[in-house]
Amino acid sequence: MKTNRQPKTATPVPAPNEWQNGCIKLPAPPGKPIRGRGHERIRLLGSQCPPNERAARKWFYEKLCEEGTGNHDEHADRVNEGSSNPLFLSAEAYQLWCAHKEFWIQEHQSFVTQKKAAEQDAKRKINTSLKRAAAKASFTATELKAKMKRLKALLQDDQGQPLALELIKSAEPWLLEALLAGVTLRKRGRLLEWNCGPFFRTFTDSFSGEPGLPFWLTVARALAAGCCPKAFNIKNLFHLDLSARDAVEMDIIISDVLPHLSALQQLKLGVGTYGFSTASLPVLPVMSRLILENVDSDDLSCRIKIESLDKQSSLETCVLQGSVSLQIDGNQEPLFERVRLETSENSYQEKPEGLRCIARPPETYRCIVGMNIPAARVLVRMCSDHSSNPAPPQWWNSGWANPDWWKKSGYGLDEHKTCFADRRLDLVGLVSIDLEVAEVLASAHIPICIPAPLLTPEILGRFQASKSDFYITKMAGNDPLFAQQLLGTMARTLTIEVEGNLSSDTARALATFVGVSLTLKLSDRELDEMAADALGNFYGKLILISEKFGGGEFSQRSAEKLIQKKGGLQVDGSWKLAAETLKVLGERHDFDLGKYRSRYFEKRKGDNGRFCKVQPQFNYSVDAYELSVTKGKIGETGLPKVVSIRRLHYCNDFIKKLIEEGYQEIPPSISTAATPC
């Protein structure tokens, strides 16, 4: 029986005030945020969640976490523990869900419907594009799909990929149109959103989701042939990340891809052992960032040569990532007055427009494995402190003083500048150095970090007149002859990373250093008594740092030798220092025990008050640190007790609680406690 009854539609539910332009915007919680301690949080998809609400609740959580809403870390959190990865909401966010549950479920259903409709529409458009392309080639759609399937098989085969790239380079417009069916590109805030289409979807990088060389070669060919889809708006492409496995692929990138992508502002190229020269780059008129990365960081044979880079008129920064041998054409040295050169790890921040953020002065990060003379001069100038120079490079103090960065870091701008004023040129990755490069480094007035195996007597001879601070890595602890040769420099401070046991002969040689400060980073398990006795002859400030995993140690007898030292002592790093050792070291008031020191606190109320003394100490019986804590009334002895903390940095939590209770730390010089811990 026919009827005119129309299908029922859900009655629209009024939207809450927090739903604004398709986004959920909640004010910050009045208490602590969801990631802080003492907050109240509610599990979103726990056992109490009705099964028919799970999908809508998960959608609600994702809308809360969208970029730009400011809700993440305030109202929503995912705990990455175990296999469930539970989702949590703040009390305010969960209350918003409960108060307008019908609206959120309705919005989720509308979202699902629209998503399905969009997917069906996309499939229809792709099929239309394939039929149109097949008709241009006088093929059926089935025949075209078979050809595309064979091409995909070639791309998936490492041996067949070179042939596939050649086929794409010579492809007719109808094939390019078919390969790019369904692709889109748009800019959303600082992010690029691209859909690579059904053909290239399997070739995207599994980590970054970015398409690779076959896709961009197809796009470049389509742009040249005038058949690139309108939905792929190439004007939105402001950054590109591409890697080449060999010189042939790099030649394709340089010759066939980059010339058609003139809107690029940031280009990152992955280079291998075949090396790379910037002279091969086409002119990219608006490129301001160039990032060159060694795609195999374990391979030290990647050579990057900087030449003809001045033709990139908009370039502001050139970044090297991974281990590279840097060669700079002497004619390019003036270029680095306006272009910032830096070497970096893979991690970095992004500016609001999506480009790499220059948040701090450039550092070397142990990336350089070799260099020529111009490269040495540029690196020295890169790491020098130009803050008081009347004519610093144009790039100096322009990007890294970004107020947004240092405000978030919790430091004032002046403090931030001070933190980076005395940086060192970190060349610990060097595998070779020649005499001329050594002369350039020796003439620099900045700290130099260099591996000991490279410091032959001839190279050390170039550093004899150097007054810069010296940082030596990989020095054998049982090589007193090298230690004696090293002390011929005129450096004011000397830092040495010692590998293996520090012998007494080597310690005796180091004690003759005439500088003001000697820092020893020890990798061995123990500083023995004889080495400690020899180091006691050093007149300057001695800094002992344990870099042993799990903590190095020295005994009470070694401490007794050190307290006879003629100069000061500072202890840092990961030492296991027992109470007896700390008691001996504490006899010298000019010794800086840092985090191992005894600390005194007072809490006064009128004429009365209480005190608390805290002394960290290592307990070998439980293989952990503990606190010796003495509390009592001021003027009395007090009651001692032991507080287990397992790790030394947990002492800060105990100190924080004391301050919250009203205690204030008192310097040792005016401490009024009756007895020590």
Image (tube, helix red, strand yellow):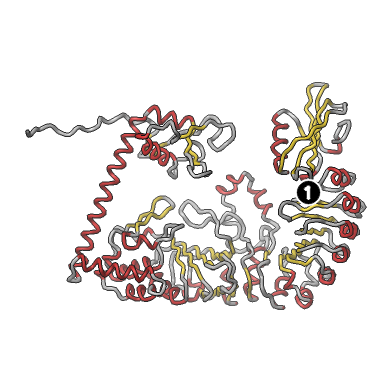
Dot 1 amino acid type: Lys
Q: Is residue 46 above or below residue 259?
A: above
Outermost residue, front side: 621
Residue 338 seen by the camera: no
Residue 62 seen by the camera: yes
Q: Dot 1, how many residues are within 10 Å of its Cα: few (below 14), some (14-19), or many (20+)?
A: many
202 or 595, which lies in front?
202
Q: Disc count in the image? A: 1
Q: From the viewer's perspective, is 119 left or right of 356?
A: left
Q: Position of residue 574 (x, y in %)?
A: 74, 51
> Which quadrant, please, contains the N terminus?
top left
614 or 579, which lies in front?
579
651 or 47, which lies in front?
47
Q: From the viewer's perspective, is 552 left or right of 240?
A: right
Picture residue at 73% right of the left edge, 65% below the top: 473
What residue sits right under mark 1 in the picture?
A: 576
Q: From the viewer's perspective, is 506 left or right of 34?
A: right
Q: Is residue 419 above or below residue 506?
A: above
Q: From the viewer's perspective, is 249 left or right of 359?
A: left
Q: Quadrant of residue 96?
A: top left
Picture residue at 53% right of the left edge, 53% below the top: 349
Q: Position of residue 607 (x, y in %)?
A: 83, 21
Q: Position of residue 72 (x, y in %)?
A: 48, 40
> Which quadrant, please, contains the C terminus?
top right
Q: Position of residue 297 (x, y in %)?
A: 57, 66
Outermost residue, left side: 1
Determine whether the residue tagged by mark 1 lies in a helix, strand or loop: strand
Q: Is residue 335 above or below residue 599?
A: below
Q: Is residue 465 above or below residue 2?
A: below
